[in-house]
Image: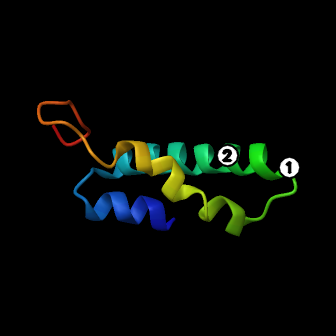
Amino acid sequence: TGVVATFLSWGLGPFEAACLGAFVNGMAGDLAARELGYHITATDVIERIPSVLRPYERVEPGTPTLRS
């Protein structure tokens, strides 16, 4: 998916990118289902990806990340 490709472009390895992509897509799907019920579309999931990623945008120096 585009999410996995994005993580690959950030320098993650294929396995890490696939795992993180699955996690993000799953969390976005869960969020969409909580907000809209189980009648969701792919667009509903895609629209929630930024909400899933937002808490991880800023990392304090010295905090372990996937890249460290």
Mark 2 is surrounded, within 10 Å at the Cα level, by few (under 14), some (14 to 19) or many (20 or more) other residues, namely some
Rendered location of residue 64, percent (x, y) = 21, 30
Q: Amino acid at mark 2?
A: Leu
Q: Is residue 65 above or below residue 33?
A: above
Which residue does the numbered mark 1 point to in the structure image? 38
Left or right: 11 as drawn, with respect to 32: left
Residue drawn where x is 37% and y is 45% of the image: 15
Cα–Cα gap, marks 2 and 1: 10 Å
Left or right: 4 as drawn, with respect to 7: right
Left or right: 42 as drawn, with respect to 59: right
Q: Is residue 66 above or below residue 62?
A: below
Residue drawn where x is 61% and y is 50% of the image: 28
Rendered location of residue 18, percent (x, y) = 44, 50
| Residue 43 falls in image quadrant | bottom right
Residue drawn where x is 61% and y is 64% of the image: 47
Secondary element under disc 2, as helix, strand or loop, is: helix
Q: What's the mark number on residue 67?
A: none
Which residue does the numbered mark 2 point to in the structure image? 31
Q: Amino acid at mark 1?
A: Tyr
